[in-house]
Image (cartoon, rainbow, N blue to C red):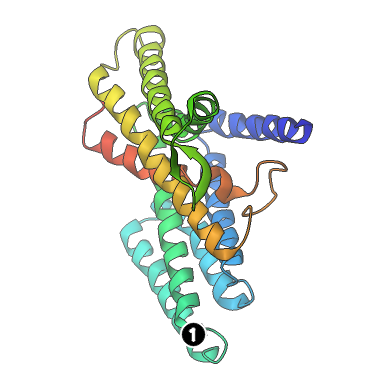
């Protein structure tokens, strides 16, 4: 328990510093490192890291993708980087086809494309009006629903949700996580609107509640997807970068699903 508390405290301080420096390159570097770390852990779990060259290409893509919006003609650079990924993995497949099969190439490609694309929505939201609040709200929706689900499941949980994938999750826990997000989102948005910005944000509070409820389910989908990969790969945690908590993927599995969902909600003008 002591290790978990110390690890969580260190992670909190690091996250706080990154959020304070949200308007600098530090924020983008941090998200890029998370992206590369998550892809590394996924490839290691799926036994792809034994193929050094294609793994390096996938991890490098996951890191560099987060900086493409800074380049002039960013769309061209995006397509160019995707071309490098596709050609690089194809050449590696041709050369290593006796050891490397289609499963490895497909998993590397999917991990390299999907993880940074999901995390890039945090960078995009950060660059919007009220951006840092949107980022904080997204992270709270992703992480605190799990805490609400844990307490609700501990005290009220009776019906197992999916015992073969995540034995401890219960239907009551999921409901508790959804309510936690709805209430938390409402409180955070109210304070940010009425107290910090003197009513200038104009949130749609009914939508805030609905988004909070849905984000808990979306985050659960990310959690279960990551758990399913772990079970099929025969591992307990993706890593030990946070002693007592696991690896990058163990902490950001829900974020990978909630962040794109929140980006859609914000860009569609549903939140305010």
* Secondary-structure class at tag 1: helix
Q: Residue at x 66, y 35 (%)?
A: 11
Residue 127 seen in render: no
Q: Does 193 sit left or right of 140 as displayed?
A: left
Outermost residue toward the right in this view? 2
Relative placement, left or right, of 242 versus 148 is right
Where, by quadrant of the figure, is residue 137 drawn?
A: top left
Residue 53 x, y percent position in the rendering: 59, 77
Q: Give the answer, above or below, for where 60 lies relative to 270.
A: below
Numbered-mark total: 1
What residue is pinned by disc 1?
93
Q: Is residue 227 above or below residue 177?
A: below
Is residue 165 or residue 113 the one in the foreground? 165
Question: Looking at the picture, does residue 129 appear above or below residue 166?
Answer: above
Q: Is residue 245 left or right of residue 100?
A: right
Q: Residue at x 27, y 27 (%)?
A: 210
Q: Nearer the viewer, residue 155 or 97?
A: 155
Image quarter of residue 133: top left
Percent across and percent down for residue 153 are 50, 30
Q: Nearer the viewer, residue 150 or 101?
A: 150
> Residue 235's quadrant in the figure?
bottom right
Q: Residue at x 43, y 23 (%)?
A: 180
Question: x, y (%) of residue 50?
Answer: 64, 76
Q: Is residue 259 visible?
A: yes
Q: Quadrant of the N terminus?
A: top right
Vertical order, 62 against 155 (above or below): below
10 Å neighbourhood of mark 1: few (<14), some, or many (≥20)? some
User: Where is residue 46 shown, x and y percent of the image?
Assistant: 56, 68
- Looking at the rendered image, the quarter that the C terminus falls into is top left
- Residue at 50%, 33% in the rendered image: 146
């Amino acid at each position: 328990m002591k290790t978990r508390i110390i690890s969580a405290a260190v992670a909190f301080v690091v996250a706080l510093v990154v959020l304070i420096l949200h308007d600098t390159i530090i924020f983008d570097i941090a998200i890029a490192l998370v992206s590369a770390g998550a892809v590394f852990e996924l490839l290691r779990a799926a036994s792809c890291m034994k193929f050094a060259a294609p793994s390096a290409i996938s991890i490098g893509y996951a890191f560099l993708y987060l900086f493409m919006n800074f380049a002039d003609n960013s769309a061209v650079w995006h397509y160019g980087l995707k071309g490098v990924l596709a050609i690089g993995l194809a050449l590696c497949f041709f050369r290593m086809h006796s050891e490397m099969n289609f499963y490895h190439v497909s998993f590397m490609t999917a991990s390299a494309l999907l993880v940074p694309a999901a995390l890039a929505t945090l960078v995009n939201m950060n660059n919007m009006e009220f951006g840092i609040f949107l980022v904080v709200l997204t992270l709270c929706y992703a992480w605190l629903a799990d805490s609400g689900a844990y307490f609700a499941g501990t005290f009220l949980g009776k019906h197992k949700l999916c015992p073969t994938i995540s034995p401890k999750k219960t239907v009551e826990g999921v409901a508790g996580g959804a309510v936690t997000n709805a209430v938390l989102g409402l409180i955070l948005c109210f304070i940010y609107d009425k107290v910090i910005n003197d009513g200038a944000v104009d949130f749609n509070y009914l939508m805030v509640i609905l988004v909070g409820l849905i984000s808990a389910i979306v985050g659960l989908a990310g959690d279960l997807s990551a758990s399913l990969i772990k079970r099929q790969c025969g591992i307990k945690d993706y890593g030990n970068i946070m002693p007592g908590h696991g690896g990058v993927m163990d902490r950001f599995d829900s974020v990978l699903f909630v962040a794109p969902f929140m980006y859609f909600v914000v860009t569609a003008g549903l939140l305010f």
